[in-house]
């Protein structure tokens, strides 16, 4: 028998998954994606509008979003196939009120499948060393920390480079 709190969380996850849809994201999502990115990364690491425009429009991008029944963007992932044919998860953002419901895991699956369909076998991403929740997500999905990057973020915080083989 699951503890009551864990069962309530599982029920919340099931409802959230049933009521949301994952769909590809494109240039028409620029403004909404930019606004959500600003909310998710209010620590100064959010992308400017032109960078998001570039990422969404690039021929090598793999981007998805999760939308609610009212068509609200709840979460997004932006991936890019790099010149060396590795996948790079550039950004994963989940609205604060929709966190811890499995949206990040779902989007990571979608971006990895998109990379696989395009012949990518290795994926990398960067994560703040202080972001334990994101690190847990990525470790649970099979990513490995391969390097600590001193002062990687504009705030001076260190980051981890994480890598996963899709094969």
Image: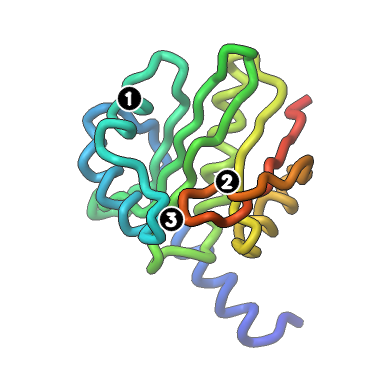
| Relative depth, front residue between 101 and 69 | 101
Q: State the residue at coordinates (36%, 54%).
A: 74
Residue 35 is situated, as x and y percent measured from the top left of the image, at 25, 50
Q: Secondary structure at mark 1?
A: helix
Q: Residue furthest bottom?
A: 4
| Other residues around mark 2 within 10 Å, as few (<14) / some (14–19) / many (≥20) | some
Instruction: State whether residue 161 is above or below residue 58.
Output: below
85 to the left or right of 54: right
Residue 95 appears in the rendering:
yes
Q: State the residue at coordinates (50%, 25%).
A: 80
The answer to whether the residue labelled 3 contacts the one labelled 1, judged by CB atoms less than 8 Å apart, is no
| Relative depth, front residue between 3 and 123 | 123
Q: Which residue is under mark 2?
A: 152
Instruction: State whether residue 120 is above or below residue 156.
Output: above
Instruction: State whether residue 43 is above or below residue 66.
Output: below
Q: Which mark is residue 54?
A: 1
Label tally: 3
First along the sequence among labels 2 and 3: 3
Residue 134 is situated, as x and y percent measured from the top left of the image, at 61, 57
Tell me which corner region of the image, top left, top right, bottom left or bottom right, holds residue 26: top left
First along the sequence among labels 2 and 1: 1
Q: Secondary structure at mark 2?
A: loop
| Relative depth, front residue between 26 and 159 | 159
Spatial CA span between label 2 and label 1:
22 Å
Of labels 3 and 1, the one closer to you? 1
Q: Which residue is under mark 3?
A: 94
Spatial CA span between label 2 and label 3:
22 Å
Quadrant assignment for the C terminus:
top right
Residue 122 is situated, as x and y percent measured from the top left of the image, at 71, 25
């Amino acid at each position: 028998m699951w503890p009551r709190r864990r069962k309530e969380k599982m029920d919340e996850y099931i409802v959230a998954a049933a009521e949301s849809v994952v769909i590809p994201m494109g240039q028409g999502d620029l403004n909404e994606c930019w606004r959500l990115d600003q909310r998710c990364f209010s620590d100064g690491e959010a992308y400017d509008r032109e960078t998001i425009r570039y990422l969404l429009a690039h021929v090598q991008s793999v981007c998805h979003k999760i939308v609610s029944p009212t068509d609200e963007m709840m979460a997004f992932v932006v991936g890019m196939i790099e010149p060396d044919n590795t996948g790079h998860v550039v950004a994963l953002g989940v609205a604060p009120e929709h966190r811890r419901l499995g949206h990040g895991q779902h989007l990571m699956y979608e971006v990895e499948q998109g990379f696989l369909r395009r012949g990518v076998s290795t994926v990398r991403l960067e994560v703040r060393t202080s972001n334990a929740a994101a690190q847990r997500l990525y470790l649970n999905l099979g990513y490995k920390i391969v390097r600590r990057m001193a002062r990687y973020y504009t705030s001076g915080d260190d980051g981890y480079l994480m890598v996963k083989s899709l094969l």
